[in-house]
């Protein structure tokens, strides 16, 4: 489970399937066994994050929500501390731009749901190949 816990209020963007969600929608879109918001985390909409004077401290990408140079420019990256990806692969994240900005990227890809589904699919393919 991912727990977003912080000492002071942090503003984050949560992207899911190509769009950035508000707090309630982010909780609804995510499996509660994987993602839990805790006190001190304020999930912003993309519009809120783009408002002048609003700091974005983290971006969480679920289901390949794109994190591009354009997004980073739109929301500002001065106070961005981390971009985290929940899923397999990071081809939807502009790694070069984040490296240039000095922002670390975390990738959590060992989810039981994905591992079990992959193993089931591999086993089915093996059985089918033996026919």
Image: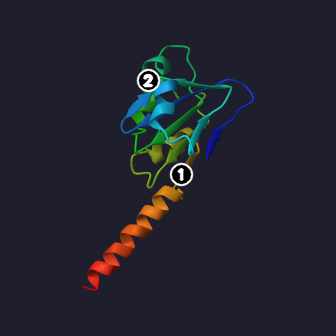
Q: Which of pointers 2 and 1 lies earlier in the amino acid sequence?
A: 2
Residue 118: give x, y in percent of width and height. Answer: 42, 65
Residue at the limit of the structure toward the right, as seen here:
7
Query: Which residue is located at x 43 percent, y 18 percent?
Result: 47
Vertical arrangement, residue 14 with respect to residue 47, above or below: below
Q: Which residue is mark 1?
A: 107
Vertical arrangement, residue 107 with respect to residue 31, above or below: below
Query: Which residue is located at x 48 percent, y 39 percent?
Result: 30
* Viewer-closest of 29 and 68: 29
SS at badge 1: strand
Label 2 crowding class (10 Å Cα cut-off): few <14, some 14-19, many 20+? some
Q: Quick one: quadrant of the C terminus?
A: bottom left
Query: Which residue is located at x 71 percent, y 32 percent?
Result: 6
* Viewer-closest of 10 and 123: 123
Q: Which mark is residue 73?
A: none
* Viewer-closest of 104 and 9: 9
Residue at the limit of the structure toward the top, as seen here:
52
Query: Which residue is located at x 46 percent, y 27 percent?
Result: 25
Q: Which residue is mark 2?
A: 46
Residue 27: give x, y in percent of width and height. Answer: 51, 32
Quadrant in which residue 94 is drawn = top left
Residue 96: give x, y in percent of width and height. Answer: 46, 46
């Amino acid at each position: 489970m991912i727990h977003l816990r912080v000492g002071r209020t942090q503003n984050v963007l949560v992207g899911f399937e190509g769009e950035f969600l508000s707090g309630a929608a982010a909780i609804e879109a995510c499996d509660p066994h994987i993602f839990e918001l805790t006190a001190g985390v304020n999930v912003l909409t993309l519009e809120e994050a783009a408002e002048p004077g609003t700091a974005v401290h983290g971006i969480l990408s679920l289901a390949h929500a794109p994190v591009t140079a354009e997004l980073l420019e739109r929301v500002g990256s001065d106070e961005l501390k981390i971009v985290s990806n929940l899923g397999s692969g990071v081809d939807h994240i502009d790694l070069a731009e984040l490296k240039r900005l000095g922002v670390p990227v975390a990738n959590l890809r060992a989810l039981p749901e994905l591992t079990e589904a992959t193993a089931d699919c591999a086993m089915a393919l093996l059985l089918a190949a033996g026919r």
